[in-house]
């Protein structure tokens, strides 16, 4: 199928997508960049004392761009830059550990992995038999034989995209296996968990929800917020960043721009209708929708107004109408019955190398050979025998030359091949020439016929005019020029009836998103060079001009009270409410006195043996881990517990009894086993984050990006 399809798939270097940042997927060793690190260039960071220069990072980004198939921009580019940095960090941090342990990768391992079910996923996807769904190892081996002969940049790409990631992935697997083998789950812990799972509690309790006291009556001061955070530094400590707000001026097409585009398309309608060469007309008028010289079933047409369009007689034009961002004219060129699926078989005599495009056989020889094959088959020769002996299509050689195609694949096939199998009839047998060579094709069957249509579209995208763009730019420039600090900007916005968009999220130095702005890298970079209160020059971001204001510079450490209030205020307020509740209940309340004080009832739970130490919730209460823990405190069997400040309220309980189950619930045992496995896995596979935290990493990428 690779030779039939008009796309590069298996025959060329497999372009691997950006490896995700994960335990092993994102670990790639770029041996070529090491040789380029000599010479002077600006530093973008240090990893364990080793300087990472800008050239190294730029080359890594370029490599990832190539893997994506070429130039990328916007958010996708920023993601590649982050991936490139992550890979460099992983390379330095992990390879050091591998070397310490003497972990190596032998040449034999490469072949054994490439040609097994453990092959890289991208390789398996490229060589998966579409009929069986199985990884075709023989095709992969054939590709590898050719790939090893490649030289220069092509060989470098294969090494960088397949070989080197596989080496490091394998080393990482070995490393994690060593960790797994050394992980220890103590016997005493297992025994304790078994006992905890058998023991159940039956309790009586009183629940006093925090909402018995109105939030408005409990004020939380800045000092109280700061004091609470200082006692919980590990939770609230954060890296520094910036708080940025902005005002935007839309440069999207105006109503006048839409009317202008509508008039332009309307003026084309008569000439489009009269022109007998729709393909040339569409190209000449630079339509936003390309001409498709094929028929599409109505069920597969993805457009507005398709009912009206498919009802047109041949040569008629419908429109103009709005479809997405385009104003469109649609011209009916014809219709025919088209099968939804086709089964065919073929023999190919190739005239070109599918990888290089170089001619491998003269046209005349190929034609004589395919004619001879046709004659032999018509004379009774076995088709499959001819396939095995002569066909150059490796994708169908072991399938008797057979393929199954759906109508949606029409445009991905060589035009001549597609028209033969879809436009012809079942039983047709003919020789067809395509860009790949000569095919002898037999149409075996066609199913589920539906009326399909050939439609030409002349479309113009609704774009903003120069006047619209200039107006937005002028408005942004005026704001930036007249309001040179945050207070002045606030006043200007209020006076002009504009809207300032506040982004409470702390923005980090290498971020590129700001609220709904997906490509705000330049604005963020400005913010890290500006002073608090500064107002930026206008930035053209997406379809708008944006003026930013640096509201706050947040240093590393605990956030200030204003920044922290949305995160911490309710927690501190609940603590203050708990104090008020405690004062009202007195020093040694009973369940009855607590219930009476707040006019609630004494409740019970656990009679059904559902409260164990491993429980996640208490029926009728929800998730309250402190309450579950107190349920197994034997001191609470003889008297009421101390007040328990829970997540949703204040509790007081008394343990009625502690019992043991005769047998552990199988579901609970399964959960405990799952938790044990989860603990072991987390211990094993969190090693990189641990190594990364211990490493000395200085990130100065913002110098170049």
Image: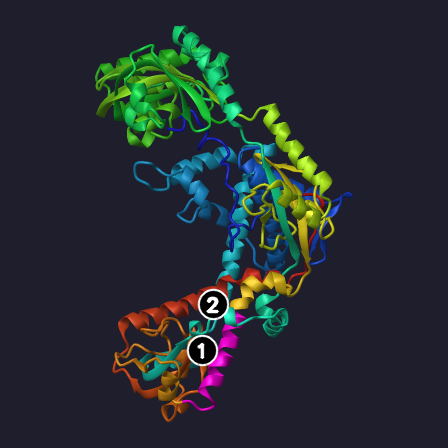
What residue sits 50% from the left and 61% below the top? 685
Residue under label 2, please give it. 181
Residue 664, quarter of the rendered image: bottom left
* 275 up-or-down from 245: above or below: above
Disc 2 vs disc 1: which is toward the camera? 1
Q: Position of residue 55 (x, y in %)?
A: 70, 42
Q: Magenta segment range?
A: 571-589
**Which quadrant, please, contains the N terminus?**
top left
**The one of 96 and 16 positioned closer to us in this rendering:** 16
Q: Position of residue 419 (x, y in %)?
A: 32, 17
The numbered dot on residue 231 is: none
**Earlier sequence position, callout 2 versus callout 1:** 2
The numbered dot on residue 186 is: 1
What residue sits 54% from the left and 50% below the top? 26
Can residue 52 be seen from the camera position used here? Answer: no
Can residue 650 be seen from the camera position used here? Answer: yes
């Amino acid at each position: 199928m690779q030779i039939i399809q008009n796309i590069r798939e298996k025959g060329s270097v497999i372009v691997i997508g950006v490896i995700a940042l994960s335990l092993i997927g994102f670990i790639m060793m770029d041996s070529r960049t090491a040789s380029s690190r000599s010479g002077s260039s600006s530093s973008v960071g240090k990893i364990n004392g080793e300087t990472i220069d800008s050239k190294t990072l730029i080359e890594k980004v370029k490599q990832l761009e190539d893997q994506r198939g070429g130039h990328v921009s916007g958010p996708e580019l920023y993601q590649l830059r982050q991936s490139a940095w992550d890979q460099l960090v992983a390379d330095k941090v992990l390879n050091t550990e591998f070397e310490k342990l003497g972990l190596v990768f032998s040449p034999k391992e490469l072949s054994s992995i490439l040609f097994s079910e453990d092959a890289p996923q991208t390789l398996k996807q490229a060589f998966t038999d579409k009929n069986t769904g199985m990884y075709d190892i023989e095709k992969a081996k054939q590709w590898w034989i050719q790939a090893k002969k490649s030289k220069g940049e092509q060989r470098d790409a294969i090494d960088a995209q397949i070989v080197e990631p596989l080496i490091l992935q394998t080393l990482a697997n070995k490393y994690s296996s060593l960790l797994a083998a050394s992980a220890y789950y103590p016997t005493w812990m297992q025994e304790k968990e078994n006992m905890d799972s058998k023991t159940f509690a039956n309790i009586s309790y009183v629940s006093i929800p925090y909402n018995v006291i109105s939030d408005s009556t409990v004020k939380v001061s800045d000092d109280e917020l700061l004091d609470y955070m200082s006692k919980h530094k590990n939770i609230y400590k954060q890296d520094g960043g910036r708080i940025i707000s902005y005002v935007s001026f839309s440069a999207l097409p105006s109503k006048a721009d839409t009317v202008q585009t509508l008039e332009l398309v309307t003026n084309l309608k008569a000439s489009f209708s009269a022109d007998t060469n729709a393909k040339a007309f569409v190209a000449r008028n630079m339509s936003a929708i390309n001409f498709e010289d094929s028929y599409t079933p109505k069920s597969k047409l993805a457009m507005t107004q398709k009912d009206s369009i498919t009802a047109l007689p041949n040569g008629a034009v419908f429109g103009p109408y709005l479809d997405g961002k385009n104003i469109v004219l649609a011209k009916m060129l014809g219709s025919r019955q088209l099968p939804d699926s086709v089964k065919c078989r073929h023999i190919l005599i190739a005239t070109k190398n599918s990888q290089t495009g170089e001619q491998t056989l003269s046209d005349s020889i190929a034609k004589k050979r395919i004619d001879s094959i046709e004659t032999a088959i018509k004379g009774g020769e076995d088709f499959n025998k001819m396939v095995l002996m002569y066909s150059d299509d490796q994708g169908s050689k072991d399938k008797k030359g057979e393929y199954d195609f759906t109508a949606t694949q029409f445009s991905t096939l060589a035009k001549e091949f597609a028209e033969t199998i879809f436009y012809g009839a079942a039983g047709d047998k003919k020789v067809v020439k395509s860009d790949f060579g000569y095919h002898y094709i037999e149409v075996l069957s066609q199913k589920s016929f539906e009326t399909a249509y050939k439609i030409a579209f002349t479309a113009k995208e609704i774009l903003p005019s120069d006047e619209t763009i200039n107006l937005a730019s002028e408005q942004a420039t005026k704001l930036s020029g007249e309001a040179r600090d945050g207070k002045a900007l606030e006043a200007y916005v209020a006076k002009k009836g504009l809207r300032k968009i506040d982004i409470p999220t702390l923005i980090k130095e290498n971020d590129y998103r700001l609220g709904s702005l997906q490509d705000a890298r330049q604005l963020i970079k400005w913010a890290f060079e500006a002073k608090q209160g500064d107002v930026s020059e206008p930035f053209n971001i997406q379809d708008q001009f944006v003026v930013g204001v640096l509201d706050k510079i947040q240093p590393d450490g605990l956030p200030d009270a204003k920044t922290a209030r949305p995160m911490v205020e309710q927690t501190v307020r609940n603590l203050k409410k708990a104090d008020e509740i405690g004062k009202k209940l007195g020093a040694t309340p009973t369940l009855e006195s607590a219930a009476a004080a707040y006019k609630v009832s004494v409740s019970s739970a656990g009679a059904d043996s559902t409260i164990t130490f491993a429980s996640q919730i208490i029926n009728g209460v929800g998730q309250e881990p402190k309450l579950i823990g107190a349920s197994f405190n034997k001191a609470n069997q003889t008297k009421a517990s101390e007040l328990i400040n829970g997540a949703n309220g204040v509790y007081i309980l008394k343990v009625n009894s502690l019992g043991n189950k005769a047998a552990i619930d199988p579901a609970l045992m399964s959960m405990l086993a799952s938790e044990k496995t989860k603990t072991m896995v987390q211990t094993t596979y969190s090693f990189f984050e641990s190594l990364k935290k211990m490493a000395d990493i200085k990130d100065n990428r913002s110098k170049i990006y």
